[in-house]
Image (cartoon, rainbow, N blue to C red):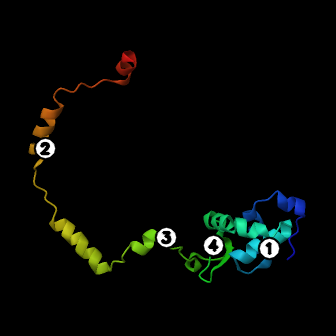
Amino acid sequence: MSIKKSKDELELMSNKDIAALILEDSKKTINTADLFKKIIKLLELPESTFEKKIADFYTSLATDKRFILLDNGKWDLRSNHTSDKVVKVATDDDEEDEEETEEEKVEEIEDSEDNYDDTDDESDYDDDTNEELKDLVVIDDDELELEQ
């Protein structure tokens, strides 16, 4: 690895920025653990840092748009790839959702159109609403301030 920065310069940088330099320099993809170990080595940090901070490091990579997690479980710079190589990180919500076929989606739309009633039943609503609201008074902001 030939990162052209001194330890002092690296200490002023975030782990994400150092990771970007490592990936740029190496020209290959690297998994989370190996990437973080390289950062620890560059900064001459104790090995206990790995266990304490690896989860935070992963999260910081996952939330930084400069990085992508490839389908082989390795990180790279987004600028090196087209969007079709990006893996979608599954969430709990994704696992619970059932996939719908196009046919099912069309059926849902047709059902919702069949159940749509465009008759004008607003008169019942208007009478009830008007009766409930007849004693209400509208006060503008200026009047409200005067009352306080």
Q: Quadrant of residue 126?
A: top left
Q: Are marks 2 and 1 in contact (CB under 8 Å)?
A: no
Please give the residue where the numbered disc 4 appears in the rendered image.
68
Q: Which one is in front, 15 or 47?
A: 47
- Dot 1, crowdedness within 10 Å: few (<14), some or many (≥20)? some
Please give the residue where the numbered disc 3 appears in the rendered image.
91
> Is residue 132 shown left or right of residue 37?
left
Whichever of callouts 3 and 4 sits on the residue coming sooner in the sequence is 4
Q: CA distance from mark 3 to mark 4?
A: 16 Å
Please give the residue where the numbered disc 1 appears in the rendered image.
38
Q: Which one is in front, 119 or 2?
A: 2
Task: Residue 26: give x, y in percent of width and height.
Answer: 79, 78
Mark 3 belongs to which amino acid?
Thr
Marks 2, 1: nearer the viewer = 1
Q: CA distance from mark 2 to mark 4?
A: 53 Å
Mark 4 belongs to which amino acid?
Ile
Please give the count of numbered marks on the rendered protein.
Answer: 4
Q: Name the quarter where the N terminus is drawn.
A: bottom right
Whichever of callouts 3 and 2 sits on the residue coming sooner in the sequence is 3
Q: CA distance from mark 1 to mark 4?
A: 18 Å
- Dot 2, crowdedness within 10 Å: few (<14), some or many (≥20)? few
Mark 2 belongs to which amino acid?
Tyr
Whichever of callouts 2 and 1 sits on the residue coming sooner in the sequence is 1
Q: CA distance from mark 3 to mark 2?
A: 42 Å
Please give the residue where the numbered disc 2 appears in the rendered image.
125
Q: In terms of secondary structure, where does tag 2 sit?
A: helix
